[in-house]
Image (cartoon, helix red, strand yellow):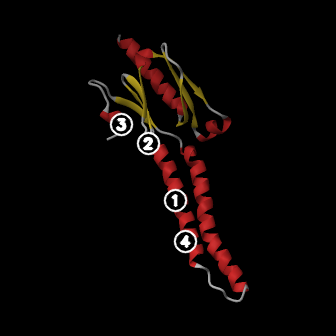
Amino acid sequence: MSYVEKHLIPGESVQYETKLHWIVMLGHAAIGVLLAVLAITIPIAWASLGAKAKGHAVPAAVYWLGLVLLLAGGALFFAGMLKRNATEMAVTSKRVIVKTGIAERRTLEILLSRIESIAVDEPALGRLMGYGTVIVKGTGGTPEAFEKIYHPMEFREQVQRQIAGEREIV
């Protein structure tokens, strides 16, 4: 059960959920792949150089180095996945809820009636790939920016729909 589902108040329902775009993992994945390539090529290159130097065997330490690099690359990729999956963003019938982090959790919950404005900043690449920054400003509060959100315009539209629906009822 997600953080959002656990913390719904009576009469509240989730209207829209999103997460971080996969682009947040790009750096983790790139370094992970680089380490994996190094893990494979170092022993091969050592063996190739050793074969030219009259058949010397590859030392065990070189294989251990390759294993350490491979594990480090995998751990880095896993850390990127954790970061992406540990962030929840939802629009409910009463609030906007954003939760980030696992060990150090940060939550933001703003009642729809207290939202003053919601802005979207999409770089050119973000428009093409479907990510951007959403900036939520509550009445009397400081703006809260959430970067690299998947489909930020849809998130904003869902907030606006819920606000409009709430105002029609009141």
Q: Quadrant of residue 30?
A: bottom right
Q: Which amino acid does label 3 sit on?
A: Tyr
Q: Which of disc 4 and disc 2 is earlier in sequence?
A: 4
Q: What residue type is labelled 4?
A: Trp
Closer to the camera: disc 3 or disc 1? 1
- The residues tagged by marks 4 and 1 sit, at their Cα atoms, a distance apart of 15 Å
Q: What element carries label 3?
A: helix
What residue is at 53 percent from the left and 41 percent from the top? 21
95 left or right of 149 in image:
left
Q: In this view, does 160 lie above or below 132?
A: above
Mark linked to residue 3: 3
Mark 3: give few (<14), some (14-19) or many (20+) Cα within 10 Å.
some
Which residue, as the protein is rendered here, is positioned at the far right? Answer: 52
Mark 2: give few (<14), some (14-19) or many (20+) Cα within 10 Å.
some
Q: Which of disc 1 and disc 4 is earlier in sequence?
A: 4
Q: Mark 4 points at which residue?
A: 64
Q: Is mark 4 on a helix, strand or loop?
A: helix
Q: Which of disc 3 and disc 4 is earlier in sequence?
A: 3
Q: Position of residue 136 (x, y in %)?
A: 51, 23
Closer to the camera: disc 4 or disc 1? 4
Q: Which amino acid does label 2 sit on?
A: Ala
- The residues tagged by marks 3 and 2 sit, at their Cα atoms, a distance apart of 10 Å
Q: In this view, does 140 lie above or below 24?
A: above
How many numbered dots are placed on residues in this image?
4
